[in-house]
Amino acid sequence: MKTLIFLFLFTMARADDFDPAAGQAGSLAVSLNDSRIRGWAETVHRYEPGPDVDETWQTPAKALGPANDDPFDVVGLGRGGLIEFSWPAPLLNGPGPDIAIFENSFSDRFLELAHVEVSSDGQNWQRFPSISQTASPTGSFGITEPTDLSGLAGKYRATFGTPFDFSDLPENPLVDRNAIRFVRLIDVVGDGSNLDSLGHPIYDPYPTFGSAGFDLDGLAVLAPPPLTLLETTLTSSAVTFTWSVEPGKTYAVESSSDLSQESWQPIRTLTASSRSLTHHAPLSTKSFFRLRHIP
């Protein structure tokens, strides 16, 4: 029975392409100007470049701070190399993607890829699930379709990051998804010797020399835009609150009598149809109101 389930899931993955290149309808690419970016990686914990990357590309500090549009301001991982980043406090596991990883590809289809792994203690790691549907080797300057890829860094061209959501990680008792402090990238050797989560070969440009492998431009830390109270209208009998929200997201309106964490009670739950959400409440000097996003 388990075998039948596995084959069914694999068939479904093959039948449905993944999101397209940056700038196209439905793409999940994160731009440099995305409002969800709250910070960038600032500390390299470990860097071990693989073969065939020249010394000029082996400056890990070039991956720190904001990514940019300079294709030379990157650190190369080399063939099968790795880089790890660390943070003093856990990264937020919020609604939607939590990090985005930027490569320096000059086109939508020349894509050098990397596995992404995270850890809460720097010792035990969990890899993000990945799927590659590229059917055969691409050669040194071959093309890879973004719609054939999921869960691998490097899916988009320069200035657009690949998003990763900690909630997508498989359950692992040794890795706390709500206390991630380390992120690691491992270059995919594109000859098919590296496998995706379904055990199938991953192909990307191979062999390349001088700056072989994944070229990292930056790692962004993401969080959803904060909810902002846009307007409060008071009449003799009611108070009206209007918040900024994300269309399509679900929210709970809650009330409290004393602002303590335990006293908040849900009033109503609704899904936003526009970028604002309004709640009307009877006027009361003993009640406070807030809006909370429901993942």
Image: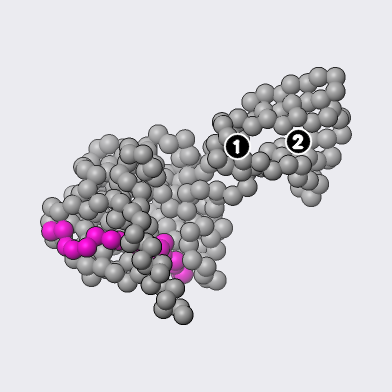
Judged left or right of residue 77, residue 256 is right
> Spatial distance from mark 1 to mark 2, Cα to Cα?
17 Å
Q: What is the x, y in percent for residue 72?
A: 21, 42
Badge 2 density bin: few <14, some 14–19, many ≥20, Cα 10 Å: some
Q: Amino acid at mark 1?
A: Ala
Foreground mark, 1 or 2, reads 1
Q: Position of residue 117 (x, y in %)?
A: 40, 62
- Which quadrant of the structure image shows residue 12? bottom left
Number of the label disc, if any, that sits on residue 121: none
Is residue 252 found left or right of 96 in the rendered image?
right
- Residues 68 and 169: in front is 169
**Which x, y percent locates residue 13?**
37, 61
Query: As shown in the figure, which amino acid type bears the numbered disc 2?
Result: Phe
Label whose residue precedes the other's in the sequence (1 or 2):
1
**Front-lying residue, 71 or 30:** 30
Q: Closest to the observer: 248 or 158?
A: 248
Image location (x, y in percent) of residue 28: 39, 45
Residue labelled with disc 1: 272
From this view, report whether residue 181 is shown above or below residue 35: below
Q: Residue at the spot x=18%, y=52% of the render?
A: 143
The magenta region covers 123-139
- Read off the residue under disc 2: 289
**Drawn side of residue 280 relative to residue 176, left or right:** right
Instruction: Report helix, strand or loop for mark 1.
Output: loop
For the image, the number of numbered tags is: 2
